[in-house]
Image: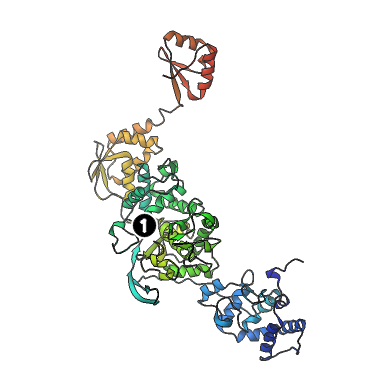
Amino acid sequence: MQPILLSDCTIKDCLQESNVEQLRQYIKWMKSHQNYLGQNTSRKSDMIAVIQRQLTVDYCCAVWSNMDALQKSAVGEALYHPERRFDPVQFEAKYGKLPETKGGRYGEDVVLPLRLFLYSRNRYRLYPLLVPKDLSDVLFQFVPKPPDARLKSTSELPDVVQRRTFVHYFLDEDETIPLELTRREMEYAALQDLFSVLKLIDQGKISVGAATHLPTAASVRRVSAALFDGDYFDPEAQSPDWDQGVASIRAFAWPLLVLAGGLAVQRNSKLILTKAGRAITQSSAADTLAELWAEWLSNIDFDEFSRIDAIKGQFRGRGKKAMTLPMARRRNIQEALQDCPVGEWVHVDDFSRFMRATCRMFQITDEPWTLYLVDSNYGCFYDHSWQHLQGRYILCLLFEYIATLGLVDVAYTHPKNAKPDFRDLWGADEFEWLSDYDGLEYFRITPLGAYCLGLEKEYTPPVVSDRTRISVLPSKLIKIHSSLTTAERMILDRYANEETETTWRLSVEKMAIAIESGHDINTLRDFLTERDDQPLPEVVDGLLCKIEKNTDVITMAGNALIMECASANVAKELIASTHVAKLCFAAGSKNLIVPVEKEKAFRKAINMLGYNVRMK
């Protein structure tokens, strides 16, 4: 006999799991209320039949109208759930608490009259609770669909946030302290940082580990120094009172994002730009950032949760095998972000609750008990540790990757005392914060984020200042009349040499190398003409035309070997052979040029003539 699916369960199927005493409780409660239609009976089958007959539309409507608001919401949420199931995690996140249960503890039997509408196939009446199929036809006639979950947002931010901080573990004491809030607008920063990072890669200054494929410490420092307004936290400015240090965040993320987006590839330990990375211009930066985010969504080479290295057990053995793939986590977070109001600040805790309230839950690991702090023999994580596992993953993805790409602005504090919710975990007394992302408090979808998330079809870059005004002189000197942006400096550095803070000189060698690397000389021409009020000097214009004309004049036909003969007579004899002549050509009196791909055939042909090749 095949088991009955939960979605097909009827009232009778559910009541069959109850014992006689439990059925008596149903009937006793029904007798104490109006319009009881049943007869006294002690047989289980008769008691089930009595309860079924009692649950008419009129009776259920009367019972439902006398329930409190939380119980009505519980019925509505279960009734309109795709599986007609009551989800306690989703309900608690949406309404703040669960309906009353017997004993008042999570996971125990709900009390009457709610028990008349929510049933369990478990004889102990534990979760999952569901609305039976035949009862749902009755309830749909009068129970309205519950409202959608709402996400809180604000247009103004406080200067400080108040946090209750742990004082003494054994006395369970705490105190309230104010934490100063730092606000960062990330849209313009991301547009500038993209060019800065590509420039460093173009200069060969970014390296990654051969085995880990993660940026080296020296590379992270170089990226951090080049970032617009620097990283979130300055490691050198940290207080000596903090035993833990805050790692680089944006500087660590950029090389990974560029690699995942195909703008660079790894050669040995160095990153080098791809054709796509070299072709980026200032006008396409927003589209590039959108593509980087799209590629990161499906990236399987890196799990952001690994950055929370205080949580052990995720890198080896059973714990490593149990870790879930990050793609589904990122997709759920992106879906929740698409429901956020553009330009409004959202608290990260409200966002986390909103994800649960809208059934966008995800798992970090299939076996949370394999994760732990400090020592696997003591303490571990369990399924209810959303704020420790999923909550920290959300913080990391928002702070280190989504904000770095400019999709959101952020407001944050130092992580110390920001989220003391981990203090009840074994071994937590060794840490001042659980992750470097604990200080993230608020985020706000930017116009760039709305474009990258598909909320807007078009994007207009922020207007910070006009283009830098320059003067191009016949001597190939470029005078700068105001500060260059990062993108402008990157373009100039590709074609010219910086002589002073305000002067650059066009370099024929650099222009030739740039074209050889795949850049277009017209990019330089447009750059100069758009920023100089005067037409380009004839000398400079002629130079650009000459460089453009010389493009593709010389092409690499392939690789070849130089074969040196002992004398001119030997060379003539070999060339005279029909088989050898078609495999090489003469260069001077004694040398033969052999294409690499024809080397094997050339050797065979001269061997047939009694000659061989020896290395010098």
Residue 204 locus on image (x, y percent)? 36, 41
In screen coordinates, is 84 left or right of 318? right
Give me the residue at 61% from left, 85% from top.
Answer: 65
Residue 308 locus on image (x, y percent)? 43, 59
Rendering quarter of residue 238? bottom left
> Count the marks: how many?
1
Instruction: Answer few, some or many: residues within 10 Å of disc 1's Cα (few below 14, many 20 plus, some between 14 and 19).
Output: some
Quadrant of image for the N terminus = bottom right
Report the coloring of the rendering.
Answer: rainbow
Residue 88 locus on image (x, y percent)? 56, 73
Vertical order, 146 against 33 (above or below): above
| Residue 524 vs residue 615, the one in the foreground | 615
Give me the residue at 44% from left, 71% from top.
Answer: 424
Q: Is residue 439 visible?
A: no
Quadrant of image for the C terminus = top left
Vertical order, 564 against 236 (above or below): above
In screen coordinates, is 324 left or right of 375? right
- Find the residue positioned furthest to the front: 377
| Residue 68 vs residue 343, the one in the foreground | 68
Give me the residue at 39% from left, 34% from top.
Answer: 516
Circle 1 sits in a helix, a strand or a loop, which is it? loop
Residue 534 locus on image (x, y percent)? 27, 43
From the image, tell me which residue sits under label 1: 247
Rendering quarter of residue 231? bottom left
Of the residues shown, which amino acid type is indicated by label 1? Ala
- Find the residue positioned furthest to the top: 569
Q: Is residue 192 visible?
A: yes
